[in-house]
Image (spheres, rainbow, N blue to C red):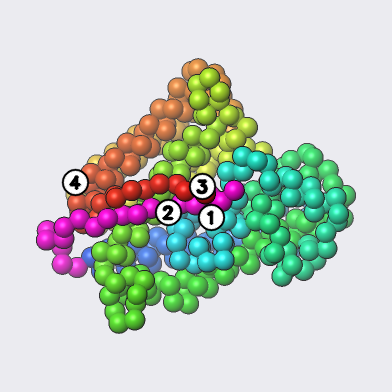
Amino acid sequence: MRFLFPAVIALLPTATLAADFRATITDAVNEHVLTRIDALAETTATLASTAQQDCAPTSAPLRAAYGTAFDAWIAASHLRFGPSEAENRAYALSFWPDTRSATPKTLAGLIASEDAAVDDPAEFAEVSIAGRGFYALEFALYDPAISAADPVYLCKLITALTRDIADTSAAIQADWHGGYAALLLQPGVDGNDTYRSESEALQELYKALNTGLQVTADTRLGMPLGTFDRPRPKRAEARRSARSKRHVEVSLVTLRDLALRLASGDETATTELTAAFDRAFDQLETIDDPTFAGVADPMQRFQIEALQQSIHQITNAVAAQLSPLLGVGEGFNALDGD
């Protein structure tokens, strides 16, 4: 299953736009995008180094490094364009949702055959994306069936997973600093066919914000919610490591940062967006359920649904405030699962 996050944003008439959005783009790229890409590369390098020193699945330092690196990915995961799209890097880092349980099946196959790919980074990079990335690592560290594998091979697998995550993150970072950031920072210059105007650069950032909100509301919360008659608590993101609620929190923090940067100090937009995010954070605090296991309980389900609704309200505020301010509008924003 491929989980894609494309969105098409149609430009609105630009007669009322401010003449220069360059400062907004520069701030968003340097202070939002690159800081998160750099943090991802740094924390995943630490994760790989930690695994080399102690690869036991119950290792406290390893699990802590996993949590820190996973936070960094969630904080950057809405930036699914450019370097993250190349070579399916984003999917290699985060193959989820996995409704067909491809990740445990792939890992079980590697373990059963003691596949030698774990000894060669180039070979491991050719393993199915279902057997790579943070969600595969979560299985190796927290799932009893996978973590009960032969300790020698499991150590090699965990080391290979962390090294691959670090290598993928480093490749994303290298591409951003190696030229892609300049494309966003210098739209419209000769030879820049990726972003031919400031409007197109803003469109990309606006799309990332909108898609991030949609993923958090409709996937991070929508997957475990399922339907009232058929809740799906076992489909909650990273539930084995009790990170489901944590990922919603990290996502909202990073998306708020991007939204307020795109607001560019506009008083009305900043006030409305801040209020919308504050309502979501207030609702999140009422939920004492790190894995959203309570979706089958009517009262707990109501709290999670209220959180989901508050994120939808953020999306509405983004459309109402940022769309006219930036001169972009949502043509259609869909998740394509083909």
For marks 2 and 3, the one nearer the N-term is: 2
Residue at 33% in and 70% down: 195
Local secondary structure at mark 1: helix
Q: Which residues are magenta?
A: 1-20
Q: Nearer the viewer, mark 3 or mark 4?
A: 3
Residue at 27% in and 41% down: 317
The span from disc 2 to disc 3 (Cα, nearest Å) is 10 Å
Q: Which residue is mark 1?
A: 72
Callout count: 4
Q: Which residue is mark 2?
A: 6
Tell me: residue 197, above or below residue 17. Answer: below
- Disc 1 to disc 3: CB gap under 8 Å: no
Give the farthest residue toward the bottom.
Answer: 190
Secondary structure mostly taken by the magenta-highlighted segment of the chain: loop
Q: Nearer the viewer, mark 1 or mark 2?
A: 2
The span from disc 4 to disc 1 (Cα, nearest Å) is 30 Å
For marks 1 and 2, the one nearer the N-term is: 2
The span from disc 1 to disc 2 (Cα, nearest Å) is 22 Å
Residue at 31% in and 65% down: 201
Q: Of the residues shown, which amino acid type is indicated by label 1?
A: Ala
- Front residue (pair 235, 141): 235
Residue 16 in magenta stretch: yes
Task: Tell me, yes or no, if residue 87 can be seen here.
Answer: yes
Q: Which residue is mark 4?
A: 268
Coordinates of residue 188 in the picture (x, y in percent): 27, 75
The image quarter containing residue 274 is: top left
Local secondary structure at mark 2: loop
Image mark for residue 337: 3
